[in-house]
Image (spheres, rainbow, N blue to C red):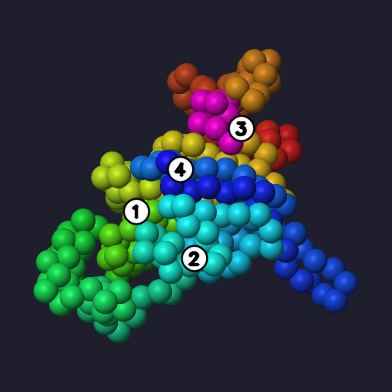
Amino acid sequence: MDYIEVKNLKRSFKVNKNEDFHALKGISFAVKKGEIFGLLGPNGAGKTTTMKILSTMLAPTDGTAKVMGFDTFGQEDEVREHINFVFGGERSLYWRLSAYDNLAYFADLYKIPLSRQKEEIPRLLKLVGLEDTGNKLVEKFSKGMKQRLQTARALLNDPEIIFLDEPSIGLDPIGARELRELIRKLADNGTTIVLTTHYLAEAEELCDRIAIINKGEIVALDTVAGLQNLLSVERRQEIIRRKEIENGERKRQKLEVNLEDIYVELLGGD
């Protein structure tokens, strides 16, 4: 069974009395259990709009979006039992509380019994590598630590699906690497993950499949290897020759077409 099924999904926003902005123009895709599915595209492409519809925060204008067989608009309560989310750059933690107290607060909102909280919160803090800082105030955390704590918060209700909207934005290389390791660990444990990111190397490393979206439409959807086949052999050779020229004598290494090259080609780069 597909855990997520999107068919001809559309979303428009009123710009003014006589004009609408069409954020999504009829996209369709499906996500399987345990998959890391990437949504890539430039700012304003429709990625976050898609994520908000799937996480029941926004109603579609037309089309359908189903999560675990439930409609995200009309069956929100059923959907929310199976999902959680982390939006990068958003302050969804209480900085004057400790990490433990933050998780306890959100556990209360999820109506998790206190007896279970006493087992679950230490387990989640350990899972995200914060077991030694559980009593530390969040305001003293680095951005990477805050992102890891947000991920722990998103795991409190034991979701089968997690939506990660640019979770590594603003992280230093160490924090970003730790987050990638955590994402892989979650997927290995069977969690289905939908990920948006502007870091193409991150998507290439993590995602089982990738949809590239531009101006509200999906222009490509496949594995990284499959996306490479969208470029002709001649064009791939041209890209490699250009890289060899740019690389010069600095490094002697095998150069290949990567996701960034594909992305630029599909979205009209030179």
The amino acid pointed to by label 1 is Glu
The residue under label 1 is: 160
Give the mark nearest the N terminus, 4 or 1. Answer: 4
- Location of the C terminus by quadrant is top right
Q: Marks 4 and 3, Cα distance to the nearest angstrom? A: 27 Å
Q: Is residue 133 rendered to the left or right of residue 177? A: left
Q: Secondary structure at mark 3?
A: helix
Q: Residue at x 67, y 39 (%)?
A: 219
- Distance from Cα at disc 3 to Cα at disc 1: 31 Å
- Residue 2 badge: 4
> Looking at the image, is mark 3 or mark 1 nearer the viewer?
1
Place residue 125 in its image quadrant.
Answer: bottom left
Judged from this view, the residue extending furthest toward the bottom is 96
Which stretch appears magenta? 221-228
Residue type (three-letter) at the residue carrying disc 4: Asp
Query: Disc 1 on helix, strand or loop?
Result: loop
Give the residue type at disc 3.
Ile
- For the residue carrying disc 4, how many other residues have a C-alpha within 10 Å: few (<14), some (14-19), or many (20+)? few
> What is the x, y in percent for residue 101?
22, 79
Front of the two marks 4 and 3? 4
Q: Earlier in the sequence, mark 3 or mark 1?
A: 1
Residue wearing tag 3: 262
Secondary structure beneath disc 4? strand
Kind of residue at badge 2: Gln
| Numbered circles on residues, count | 4
Q: Which numbered circle lies on residue 75?
A: 2
